């Protein structure tokens, strides 16, 4: 038998657990938020888009919790809805420390439940109905997962270093890509142009500085002027300095 009868309702102790877990985890998150973002950036290099996969795992986990509570059945390794919400809340709070890893791991209980349900052949009507519901939920998330696989392949094939930097500019993997662009100069000049057009914050100033050194005044002067017009003050100063450098290079031969 792949299921067992659960208690009809989650008792007040479950609610106390949820509150205590949230309070205990929040203090750990506030001190290390940058670490979680770097983990997310690293995972997004391998299994993009990382936020899609995290959301899919979270929704699947909670969905099976809802099924468990509605049918008053206990699935192996899968908590019912209030417990599931508590675990999900803790995983979300730990995003700041561990990145999406805790959220991605939420997919394990529903995957295990789905495998058990698929392999079972229950005679009991309640169990048979539960099996159908679990497999239907799995099918829905499987379709979403297929879409995610298409996005993954498409992103890995088409996303440039510049696009990755714009998305994760404040992370260690993003900074590593910036350093790589510097080593690839002047071949990376188009990447700098992309960052100036699509990026934001300090990374635009850094790209502008490099464009001021290796850029083409005929093509890049107007790009820098437009970027300066919409940039914040600190970045605008860097862009204007790069523009001045580019214009001096144009005038120097004469």
Image (tube, rainbow, N blue to C red):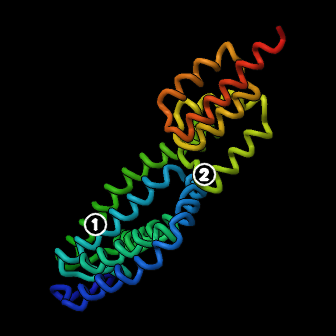
Tell me if residue 50 can be seen. Answer: yes
In this image, 175 relative to 125: left or right? right
Q: Secondary structure at mark 2?
A: helix
In this image, 11 relative to 185: left or right? left
Above or below for 68 versus 17: above
Above or below for 215 versus 173: above
Q: Are marks 1 and 2 in contact (CB under 8 Å)?
A: no
Q: In this figure, which residue is indicated by the disc labeled 1?
A: 63
Instruction: Give me the C-alpha separation between circle 1 and circle 2.
Output: 28 Å
Q: Earlier in the sequence, mark 1 or mark 2?
A: 2
Viewer-proximal residue, 178 or 74?
Answer: 178
Disc 2 residue crowd, few under 14, some 14–19, many 20+, Cα 10 Å: some
Residue extending farthest to the bottom is: 13
- Give the numbered dot on residue 78: none
Residue in the picture at 49% in, 48% down: 149
Disc 1 residue crowd, few under 14, some 14–19, many 20+, Cα 10 Å: many
In this image, 239 relative to 250: left or right? left
Q: In this figure, which residue is indicated by the disc labeled 2?
A: 45
């Amino acid at each position: 038998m792949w299921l067992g009868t659960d208690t009809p309702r989650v008792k007040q102790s479950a609610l106390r657990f949820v509150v205590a877990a949230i309070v205990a985890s929040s203090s750990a998150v506030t001190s290390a938020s940058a670490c979680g973002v770097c983990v997310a950036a690293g995972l997004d290099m391998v299994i993009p888009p990382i936020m899609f996969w995290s959301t899919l795992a979270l929704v699947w986990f909670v969905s099976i919790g809802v099924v468990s509570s509605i049918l008053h059945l206990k699935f192996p390794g899968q908590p019912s809805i209030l417990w599931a919400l508590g675990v999900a809340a803790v995983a979300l709070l730990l995003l700041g420390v561990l990145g999406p890893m805790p959220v991605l791991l939420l997919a394990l209980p529903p995957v295990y439940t789905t495998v058990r349900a698929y392999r079972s052949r229950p005679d009991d009507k309640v169990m048979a109905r539960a099996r159908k519901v679990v497999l239907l939920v799995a099918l829905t998330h499987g379709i979403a997962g297929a879409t995610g696989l298409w996005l993954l392949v498409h992103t890995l094939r088409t996303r440039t270093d510049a696009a990755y930097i714009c998305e994760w500019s404040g992370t260690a993997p993003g900074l590593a890509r910036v350093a790589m662009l510097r080593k690839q100069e002047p071949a990376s000049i188009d990447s700098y142009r992309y960052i100036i057009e699509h990026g934001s914050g300090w990374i635009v100033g850094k790209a502008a500085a490099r464009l001021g050194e290796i850029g083409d005044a005929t093509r890049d002067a107007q790009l820098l002027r437009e970027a300066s017009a919409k940039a914040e003050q600190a970045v605008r100063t860097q862009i204007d300095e790069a523009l001045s450098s580019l214009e001096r290079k144009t005038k120097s031969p004469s």
